[in-house]
Amino acid sequence: METPPDTPTLPPERDEAGTSTTQIQLTMPEIASGSLAAGSTAISSYNLEWNQGSGTAFYEVVGETTESLDRTATVDSLAPGQTYTFRYRVKNIHGWSAGYSPEVQIMAASKPSAPAAPSTTLVGSTVTVAWGAPAANGAPILSYVIEIQDSAGGWQLETTDCDGADPATLSAASCTIPQSTLTSPTGSFQLERGDLVVARVGAVNQLGQGDPSPANSDGARIQTLPAAPYGLASGPGTSASQIEVAWSPLATDAERGGVLGEVAITSYHVEWDAGTPTGPWAELVGLSSAYVATTYTTSPSDPAQVLTAGSTYRFRVRAQNAQGWGAYSSLVSILAAGVPAQMAMVTVTDDAGVPSVSIHWTSPAANGSPLTAYEIEI
């Protein structure tokens, strides 16, 4: 038996592609002609109504004044961010359905636009990712999705330090990640010295996440701690009362921990054992204030650096850059001694009765190390 159609049980559906800040497109779910829900006959019209943005009164969008089987309809010239209420009913030859579908509220809005490419900036031992807020498209931006490219080229979230839902991150449109997070060999990113920190950002509103931004093509490159200094040796200034320790400057990018010559060594920290091999290491220079020379000479006038001639002292050095202190060098042991003092003039006597002469001299100051030989030239 044919009857008027049943009341629709599903509300109209928002069409993402046709909805913007000034326009809403909807589709009314189909009621199959001839079905029991259609009253066992053909549907002749779909009637969509809306409240024009306020109140309880509804007004025709399509399908009442003129019958229409087009289930998709569009309303435009809307206020961005305004919410509108919609409902629909259906008709066959016996009349309209007894009631309207459930109402649905739809905002004149769409997902946020894609932000412009973010920037990545090295700040000390951290990397700051910053971006500009994109067009929200009618609905406030609720959060951001920040992704960092890993060493294999994949995209990874970093929600510990770059939680895009955190109010501070949302307000600043930036976040800061420790370099140690990006370089950890067991972490998600495993970046290495010289790698560009590549990021992309997507914005989220109540309609969902918009397209991600383009990735940055320049910006922060990973820096590492400097290498351990090397080539430690006694310098020419070493004597019985002072020791000069010298080392090779860290000159290459790999040694300095950077790339493209952008990383400088800011200090060399020199320590010694003060002649007590089992005692603690003591600073000579470079920790309490910066020291960038590649030699250091102990001071005989400093009570803390007075040496015992002939004793051996151990030294080690480490280097600092913007990321912090690197590893210590290998130890070097240096004897507090110099070359023997200049000889006084020798005397030569004729040996009586034999065809020879005798050469006589006075032993010079040994300067901290026992004399082991003389070199005699005629």
Image (spheres, rainbow, N blue to C red):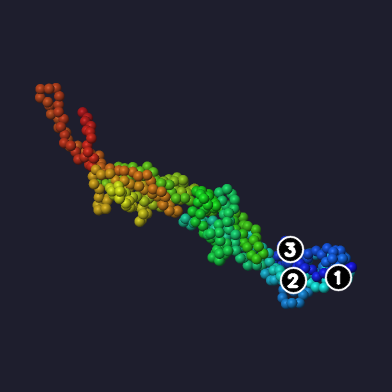
Determine which residue is flagged by label 3: 15
Image quadrant in which the N terminus is located: bottom right
Mark 1–mark 3 Cα distance, whole angstroms, equals: 28 Å
Q: Earlier in the sequence, mark 2 or mark 3?
A: 3
Q: Position of residue 256 (x, y in %)?
A: 44, 48
| Residue at x 70% of width, y 71% of height | 83
Q: Position of residue 150 (x, y in %)?
A: 56, 51
Residue 4, numbered label: 1
| Residue at x 33% of width, y 47% of height | 315
Which one is in front, 171 or 93? 93
Q: Amino acid at mark 3?
A: Asp
| Residue at x 85% of width, y 64% of height | 35
Which one is in front, 6 or 208? 6
Determine which residue is flagged by label 2: 103
Nearest-to-viewer mark from 1 and 3: 1
* Callout 1 secondary element: loop
State the count of labels. Answer: 3
* Callout 2 secondary element: loop
Mark 1–mark 2 Cα distance, whole angstroms, equals: 21 Å
Mark 2–mark 3 Cα distance, whole angstroms, equals: 16 Å
Outermost residue on the left side: it is 352
Which one is in front, 296 or 47? 47
Q: Earlier in the sequence, mark 1 or mark 2?
A: 1
- Circle 2 packing at 10 Å, graded few (<14), some (14-19), many (20+), is some
Q: Amino acid at mark 2?
A: Glu
| Relative height, residue 373 to residue 56 (above, below) | above
Left or right: where 201 falls relative to 373:
right
- Circle 1 packing at 10 Å, graded few (<14), some (14-19), many (20+), is many
| Relative height, residue 268 to residue 25 (above, below) | above
Q: Amino acid at mark 1?
A: Pro
Left or right: where 362 falls relative to 250:
left
Q: Earlier in the sequence, mark 1 or mark 3?
A: 1
